[in-house]
Amino acid sequence: MTSTSGSGRPLLNRRLAEFGTTIFAEMSALAVTTGAINLGQGFPDTDGPESVREAAVRALRDGRGNQYPPGPGVPELRTAISGHQLDRYGLTYDPALEVLVTAGATEAIAASLLALVEPGDEVIALEPYYDSYAASIAMAGGTRVPVTLRPSDGRFRLDLDELRDAVTPRTRLILLNTPHNPTGTVLTRAELTEIARLAVERDLLVVTDEVYEHLVFDDAEHIPLASFPGMRERTVSIGSAGKTFSFTGWKVGWLTSTPELVAAVRSAKQYLTYVASGPFQYAVAEALALPGSFFDDFRAELRAKRDLLSEGLTAAGFDVYRPAGTYFVTTDIRPLGESDGFAFCRALPERAGVVAIPNAVFYDHREAGAPFVRFAFCKRTSVLKEAVVRLKSLAG
């Protein structure tokens, strides 16, 4: 099929003209054709807890969720989400009015931006950012304004002065991601305090992508922005079961906010998927009630995998930014004599039998991300050990 109609008019809406096949599809296909270990796309290679999987089977057998579930989500899950927010963060949300279940966090992000952004509004996002952010802002008719996280002292840091300078009279919303994909940065209490102060001062809405909330390591702490003074009434907080419970294919996400903001987002969401993931919603409700030891053990397991891959990448010659959260390690390829992340990642499967993702795809300012490459460590330990062995060939 041609990219234009018979009249010569482009087939793809101009808002989406810059978005083609994602780098994840390209690199995953390359992994298949070369037999390389896929450390590119961020999904686990093992399933989550057996009890949660059996809860989904039980829901299917009992006929719960096999037909359309309620538009806002099944009551059991909305209640569980509300309880999770209260137990972990002291945030109180009415399950009936202030919780909305979505088809993964990606739909929650898209629906929030479609509902809250008018054409011409500016949306600030921390660059590099998850690729759906740019597409969702474009579909809403907004203008994205990147504020770049830059490497310093072993981590990627937010320049709060740059963030403040990015706000203009046209700014409608800040799209915040912490723990941050792809850099692994977890914003500190001091940084979040200043972001909250800015949002209140300039009367901005904030959409927070917190899907990695349980995947924080060492001394890092995830603190929801909605818990800061003046922020509950202007923040849409987004979570997801996929990353926390290792069931990414179930596509169960959610958001919490005020009744007014939830109703606004629901107005857009109902014309996207309408509803999704019926039986899995019941299973995720049970997952959110797992004891604290599950989350502690999961973090400890991922921390060990992070360290294994980080040390292997360092031995292979990369500069490594050890993440404080998520399950991605960002590396700098310049010590290897490379500077083009795209070329490096496209050659890496043949060169070393491993697939990674060039961070430049997450930047508007592609040159800023050119030397950085992301590896996922949410894989079996045996797979990571084999990847480390293969990557040693880069060190000569």
Image (tube, grey):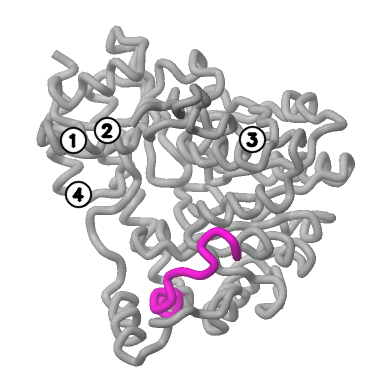
Furthest toward the bottom, the residue is 62
Give amino acid for label 1.
Ala
Residue 150 appears in which quarter of the rendering?
top right
Q: Is residue 276 magenta?
A: yes
Q: CA distance from mark 4 to mark 2?
A: 21 Å
* Closer to viewer: mark 4 or mark 3: 3
- Name the foreground residue: 183 vs 252: 252
> Position of 250 compared to 205: left or right?
left
Q: Which residues are magenta?
A: 270-284
- List the residue tagged with mark 4: 381
Residue 38 appears in which quarter of the rendering?
top left
- Name the foreground residue: 90 vs 254: 254
Pick whichever of labels 3 and 1 is earlier in the sequence: 1
Q: CA distance from mark 4 to mark 1?
A: 19 Å
Residue 317 appears in which quarter of the rendering?
top left
Q: Residues within 10 Å of mark 2 (few under 14, many from 20)?
A: many
Pick whichever of labels 4 and 2 is earlier in the sequence: 2
- List the residue tagged with mark 2: 27
Q: Position of residue 268 (x, y in %)?
A: 65, 58
Q: Are marks 4 and 3 in contact (CB under 8 Å)?
A: no
Count the marks: 4
Give amino acid for label 3.
Ala
- List the residue tagged with mark 1: 31
Q: CA distance from mark 2 to mark 1?
A: 6 Å
- List the residue tagged with mark 3: 125
Furthest toward the top, the residue is 337
Task: Kindly state the secondary structure of the residue where label 1 is placed.
Answer: helix
Residue positioned 38% across, 69% down in the render: 294
Pick whichever of labels 3 and 2 is earlier in the sequence: 2
* Closer to viewer: mark 3 or mark 2: 2
